[in-house]
Image (cartoon, grey):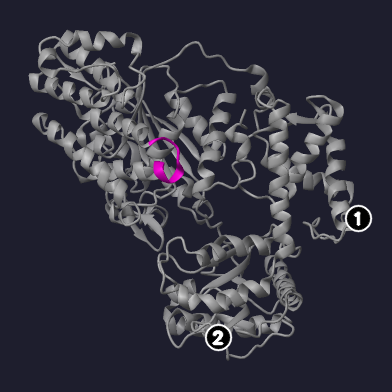
Amino acid sequence: MPLPEIITQIFKRKQKSYKMVLILSLIEELRASNQERVSFDSVKQRFLNYFIAEQERGNRVDLPPGRELWREAPKSQLKDIVNSPVNALSHILFVNSEDNTIGFHSQIQRQLGEEELSQLERLASEELQSYNAALQRFSLQGYLEKILAEYTTAKMESFAGHSLGTLFRQTLPSELKALPFIDEQYKVQGSVGQGNWATVPWLAVLDKRITETTQHGEYVVYLFAEDMSAVYLTFNQGVTKPIQEKGRRDGYAYLRDRKEALLDLLALTNMNKDENIRLVDSGLGQDYQVSTVAYIKYERGNVPNDEQLIQDLENVIEDYRLYVESAIAPSDDEAIDEEVELLPQQAEPMKDEEVTGILHQIQSHIRRQGFFFPEHLIENFYLSLKAKPFVILAGISGTGKTRLVKLFAEALGATRDNGQFTLIPVRPDWSDPADLLGYKDLSGRFQPGPITKVFVEARQPENQHKPYFICLDEMNLARVEHYFSDLLSVMETQEWREGKITTQDLISPTLLDTLEDQEEYGSLGIPENVFSIGTVNMDETTHPFSKKVLDRASTLEFNYINLEQYPDLGEQVEASDSFDAAELNHLFLRSDYLQLVDAYDVNKELVVRTTERLVKINALLEDIHAHVGFRVRDAICFYMIYNDRYKLMSEEEAFDWQLLQKILPRIQGSHSSVRRVLLSLIKGAIGSGAGVTVNIEELKEDARPLYMRWAAGQTPPTAKHPQTARKLAFMLRRLEEDGFTSFWLS
């Protein structure tokens, strides 16, 4: 049998060679002991023996931090090193601290017979061989000469998917991170531009203790001249923020003064400290020339050998390390008087191929808590949030709507304890936005509402990379259009600004009289790292939704429940803390597109195909004034594009979800025209391969022969869109039995 997908994905995100060696060491020990749980110490010893043996053979391997030889690594350090891949693989591995044993989680173990274990062993071996081969063949000289020789020609070719882009963004950062003096405190990042080729491509090493962006702070960076005549290894300072804050003229003066202060502080041995670096004659490259503190120039065709290049880089990194340590712990006689700001973490986008594995881990986390949801529901929930950061979960009471939001957020590291998950119970007496946003009290001070408090916290610089979740519980106990109207309107003002999604202000200046209130709540929009989910009960005690709300949200329905699902209590105890969300950030969920033009070029065929389907559906919906506009079209297209990018479902399965979530909630009424629309839609949802014939004329008066076939929620397994067909059947039944139908009637 093939390996479970959760296993095949474990090496997608590299953690040096440690993951592969750990898995191989564990498999060896499992076979030697013939037990499901083995001594953790024995596995650690096999792990250490591998690296010692490789070094004795003269092969280059990942080194223990701060040491040249694995034989010299103390036991305490070995424990920390091994714990790193153990934590990264905690969704499949379990360590029992009481008896110091390690093994696979019980649900994983049941899927690993001898054949599967051998497959996993081969997979780990192949990944390790590939990783080690890259270590042995790494040639910095070869890469630099390749870029200098090919970049000018590449700029005349298509930007998207170009191999040089991959080289800068993935290959070179990965290769440099393997160098022993570039440890986990450093971020390595390369760029050839965003959307278009950069005039000056770059490859930077940033110490995360003071900066994670080249826009500000100090870092080490390779800068390539526009004409590709040379590449410069530089000690540099961020230029974007100083120029934005001070203007170009004063920003340049600041950078030059800062350079002199840094030269007084740092040795920067064997580096040029003059201003003769030449990147371009004008533009951003000129900014880099001013911001450079010191440099080493390598001319094309005369780049030195790897030994010299690596030695130069190590020297600069050592100076950089000393500078950072002095900056974060300044002495009384420090040459630079300015306070060094500890900068917020910058979020990096998730690679498309990693999304599936992360969603599987989220599903595993939810199952371990004893909750089970229908197939593809988690993928659908994710895609819905990705397409629009406002989702409605609808269904009968007690189906786990609120619990899903909490567990999904928890799996991404957002909990009530750390303030990243907030549950806001909606009250029936809410009648205007002040109940959520806040109000001005009699003393003139602004009293923030619960959602405003979340927005203020989420927009803090140190929190901007973290996902924040708001769950509006029982959202339709009050009329949503009354208390949520301001947020709905502001949602539509989203726009890109400096690479971030911003909106208009939520809090009216008339509510902010004091300087303190203006500072804390002024210019407050909806942060791009906040995701709102409303839960609604579909019964006669609640208020219906208007099309204004439905257009701006995806509606996920929770009505089909299988009660015969039971938690694995043993599994739950063993793996209660197994999910590690440390490396995830809000970009995993944030929209990549705000307008269809943002995605059209790359996804033209899918967009056209989806739109043509919607045009046909709109022709039916026009009869009952339920047709959709551009906002809904764009949201559906974005959903389909994300699904295609991440390969989560088939196109028909994804479109089935969208029909259910974006089209059917708009349909309600008692007229015969509603019946005709339902019958036409159900005919399309069934398709031609389900073995069911839908004759609209015959069913106009009595549709029972159609929907009675689907009692107890059953639909033909070969229906084109089974979920849509099932819901339409229930809506049709309500129309015939009650004389009125709506998506919201359960």
* Position of the C terminus by quadrant: top left
How many marks do you count on the picture?
Answer: 2
Residue 248's mark? none
Tell me where the magenta segment starts and ends, as one range: 643-650
Cα separation between marks 1 and 2: 44 Å
Question: What's the residue type where badge 1 is placed?
Answer: Glu
Residue 730 position in % (x across, y down): 26, 15
> Can residue 592 be seen by looking at this rendering?
yes
Depicted 739 relative to depicted 35: above or below: above
Residue toward you, 695 or 53: 695
Q: Residue at x 86, y 37 (%)?
A: 41
Depicted 279 relative to depicted 202: above or below: below
Q: Residue at x 78, y 25 (%)?
A: 36
Magenta highlight on residue 235 = no
Q: Residues within 10 Å of mark 2 (few under 14, many from 20)?
A: some
Residue toward you, 224 or 255: 224
Q: Which residue is mark 2?
A: 229
Give the side of residue 675 with respect to residue 506, left or right: left
Instruction: Please tell me in which quadrant of the rendered image residue 637 appears.
Output: top left
Residue toward you, 403 or 49: 49
Residue toward you, 391 or 377: 377
Q: Residue at x 37, y 42 (%)?
A: 389
User: Helix or strand or loop: what does disc 1 sit on?
Assistant: helix
Q: Residue at x 45, y 34 (%)?
A: 379
Residue 258 position in % (x across, y down): 59, 81
Residue 121 position in % (x across, y down): 73, 38
User: Helix or strand or loop: what does disc 2 sit on?
Assistant: loop
> Can residue 213 be seen by looking at this rendering?
no
Instruction: Please tell me in which quadrant of the rendered image residue 700 appears.
Output: top left
Tell us which disc is closer to us: 1 or 2.
2
Q: Residues within 10 Å of mark 1 (few under 14, many from 20)?
A: few
Q: Which residue is mark 1?
A: 72
